[in-house]
Image (tube, rainbow, N blue to C red):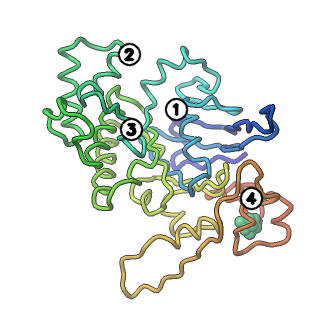
Amino acid sequence: MSVIPLSDSSVQPLLQVRDLKMHFPVKEGIFMRTGKFNKAVDGVSFDIMPGETLGLVGESGCGKSTLGRCIARLYQPTAGHIHFKGTDLATLGRKAMMPFRRDIQMIFQDPMESLNSRHTVGEILEEPFIVHNIGDKVWRRQRVSELLELVGLPARSATRYPFEFSGGQRQRIGIARAIALNPKLIICDEPVSALDVSIQSQILNLLIDLQKEFNLSYLFIAHDLAVVKHISDRIAIMYLGRIVESGEGESIYRTARHPYTQSLISAIPVPDPHHTSQRQILVGDVPSPINPPSGCAFHTRCPKVMDTCKTTAPALTQDHQPVSCHLYPV
Ligand code: SF4
C-alpha cells in the first residue's frame, strides 16, 4: 500500500485514509442473491494536511464520488480506515459520527438537488445550527447574514427561495451551508462541473479565499484536470476504484507518468492558436467495476499496453510520484 507523499512531513495530517474499500453487493437472479460486487472503491490510501487541497480526478464511474461519500460517512465503507482527529470514522455508528459531521462537510455538483426548494435560503442556512443545537433564533439569523456576505450574496437573499437564483449563486448558497459549522474538511464533489466557464473561476476563487481565511482542507473531486489545476496542492488520479498516480500538482502536469494521466493532460485545452494539439484520445468507456479487466485495469484502453499488463496487476511505486504501471518498476 502506498500513500501519496506529503510536501511537509513535519505536520500531522488532518485526514488519513488507509486501504479504503466500498464494495456494493449486486443482486442477481429471481431470488435476488448477491453473486458479485461493484468494487467502486478498491483499496485507496491518502493523507490530507490542514489547509491543503487534494485534487481527485478521474472519468465518470471511476469511484471518486463514492470515495468522497465514504469519507463524509454518507456510506459505510466495506473495509479500511478513515483516521480523523485521532478517531477511525470508518468504525463509527450513526450516533458516534454526529460530532464529526460538524467537521466534515460536502459541496455537491448540483446545488438545486441538495437545497430544499420549499425552504427559504435563510431556513436552509439555519438548519445546521438547529440540528446541532447551536445559538438562539436571533443569533442564528445574524449568523445566516454573515454567511451570505462571506460567499458574496446580499443578506436579503435569506428571504428568497433557491429557484430564484442562478446556478452560480445557488452554488454560493451550497458553500455557505458547508462552512456554516466551521468545518475542518470540505469534500467538494464536482462543485463547478455544471457551471459556465466564467462562473467556474468565480466559484474556485471563492473556495480559495475561504480556504485562506478559515484554514480549510479540501478534497476536490473533478473529472477534468484543467479544473483542479489552480486549486490543488497535490493531485491523485483515480481509475476503476484505485489511485493510479499521485503527486504534487505541478509535478503531475509537468511529468505525468501513467498513460491515463497523460491522456487526461493532453485533453486540457491550450489557449494558443499556434499550439498543435497532441491529444491522446482514449478509446471506449471505463470498464465495469463489477467485472474489472485482469492485470492492469487500464490495459483495455492503454496505448502502451504490453503482454504482461493483461495478466499482472502493477504495484504502486514508492517514490515522490507514486504510479501504478509496469513501465515504472517498483
Ligand atoms: Fe498501460 Fe501496462 Fe502501464 Fe497498465 S501497466 S498503464 S496497460 S503500460
Residue 63 seen by the camera = yes
Residue bearing mark 2: 132
Q: Residue at x 33, y 46 (%)?
A: 207
Q: Residues within 10 Å of mark 4 (few under 14, many from 20)?
A: many
Residue bearing mark 3: 216
Q: Earlier along the polypeptide chain: callout 3 or callout 1?
A: 1
Residue 99's place in the image compared with 59, above or below, is above
Q: Residue at x 82, y 58 (%)?
A: 294
Q: CA distance from mark 3 to mark 4?
A: 34 Å
Quadrant, the N terminus: top right
Disc 4 under 8 Å from ligand 1? The reply is yes
Q: Earlier along the polypeptide chain: callout 3 or callout 4?
A: 3
Residue bearing mark 4: 297
Q: Earlier along the polypeptide chain: callout 2 or callout 1?
A: 1
Disc 1 under 8 Å from ligand 1? The reply is no
Q: Residue at x 85, y 71 (%)?
A: 307
Secondary structure under the numbered disc 1 in the rendered image? loop
